[in-house]
Amino acid sequence: MSAGWIVFLKELVDALRDRRTLVTVLLSAVAVGPLVLVLVSSLVAGIEKRAEARTVVAAGIELAPTLANYFARQTYTVRAAPADYEAQLRASRLGEPVLVVPADFETALRAGEAPLLEVVSAASNQRAVTGVGPLARLLRGFNQEQATLRIALRGVAPALLEVVRVEERELADAAARSAQLATMVPFFVLMAMLYGALNAALDTTAGERERGSLEPLLTTPAPRWALVLGKWGAVAAVSMLIAVLSCLSFLPGQWLLRSEALAAMFRFGAREAAWFVALLLPLAGGVSALLMALAVRCKTFKEAQASVTVVVLAVSLLPLVTLFDQEGEAAWHLWLPALAQTTLMGRVLKGEPLPAADLAVPVVVGAALAAVSLAYVARRLRRAVIE
């Protein structure tokens, strides 16, 4: 164990000494998650700001005083559309959809007919597209008000038109609703753990082989299993260090949320961060060993990078199963690395209990993956043959 400890410290110092790679991993794996969160909050804040402005951009609103009066009673401000509103919408210079009122609007309304109102937007203009829904709901309110007035004038009670009453009831609690916003956190933390292990695993195997420092290490009297455990421990430690920093980065990242609604919904505190780190431990050990097993077969660092692409792709895509599987969680989800951690981290965000049996499955899978991979690495080093 003393030899393994010495190798562990040596590999850990080497990994932390490579400041350029370490800074790149920190920026790409740790800072990206909070940055995306801030960008999403900025987008939502912009939508909320436009909704609070309560402005309708209309062309020909002076031809429809009844409609203008309804907008005023709903505390909406009507702004005249520019003459070239179509060109501005296509060029995304105008951020609101345009309501086009026909010249015979009032005449058709008095005659009991249905005048045609156009809501003009452009699919390439995302700001205008987000405003189509609120404007359509506002116009439906005008329709309902006019229909109620017409049947009331004919002596018909408006309540007769409501055959049934519909009331929505939400079963999800506040934690479950906030988890929908925080679903991005497990993915970014998972990828931070992966990329933290990636460079360290390649450097301690194929990197040392390419630099010529692996062969002298194999000539030492230290047992092969001690060398393997020391290298693996250093790789897993770096991986978990990056994962911990990624979890902690979301804590101050919440202070930068520009949307008050998102800030109130986003719940990710010290408890959730601690659970995330605990759930990632078995995966970090298994993935680190697997990356070492793939890289130890390679002669160069670039060759090792190509070999581990499959692992990176699998860890990146497996969590997406929860997005495409609309039937909810399944028992087999806990038996797949990365998918199991994503599933359990989702439960943590929802505030659901974590049974010991469910926690034991990814631990057993991670331990088995690490044991098989490390046995292969030790066998390769024992034979001192690296193809």
Image (cartoon, grey):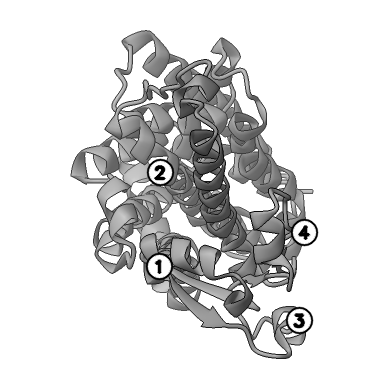
> Against 79, is 303 above or below?
above
Label 2 residue SS: helix
Q: Earlier in the sequence, mark 1 or mark 4?
A: 1
CB contact under 8 Å: marks 4 and 3:
no
Between 144 and 282, the one lying in front of the other is 144
> Against 218, is 341 above or below?
above
Neighbour tally class for label 1: few under 14, some 14-19, many 20 plus, Cα within 10 Å: few
Badge nearest the viewer, 1 or 4: 1
Between marks 2 and 3, how big is the CA–CA gap?
A: 62 Å
Q: Residue at x 35, y 40 (%)?
A: 178
Query: In the image, which disc is placed on residue 86?
Result: 3
Quadrant (top left, top right, bottom left, bottom right) of the N terminus: top left
Work out which residue is located at the far left of the displayed protein and give it. Answer: 270
Work out which residue is located at the far bottom of the displayed protein and give it. Answer: 83
CB contact under 8 Å: marks 1 and 4:
no
Task: Write down the residue under mark 2.
Answer: 233
Between marks 3 and 1, how big is the CA–CA gap?
A: 25 Å
Label 4 residue SS: helix
Q: Earlier in the sequence, mark 1 or mark 2?
A: 1
State the image quarter where residue 202 is shown.
Answer: bottom right
Q: Please, what is the three-letter code of the amino acid marked with disc 1? A: Ala
Query: In the image, which disc is placed on residue 303?
Result: 4
Neighbour tally class for label 3: few under 14, some 14-19, many 20 plus, Cα within 10 Å: some
> Against 280, is 326 above or below?
above
Q: Earlier in the sequence, mark 3 or mark 1?
A: 1
Between 58 and 151, the one lying in front of the other is 151
Query: In the image, which disc is placed on residue 72?
Result: 1
Label 1 residue SS: helix
Between marks 1 and 4, how big is the CA–CA gap?
A: 68 Å
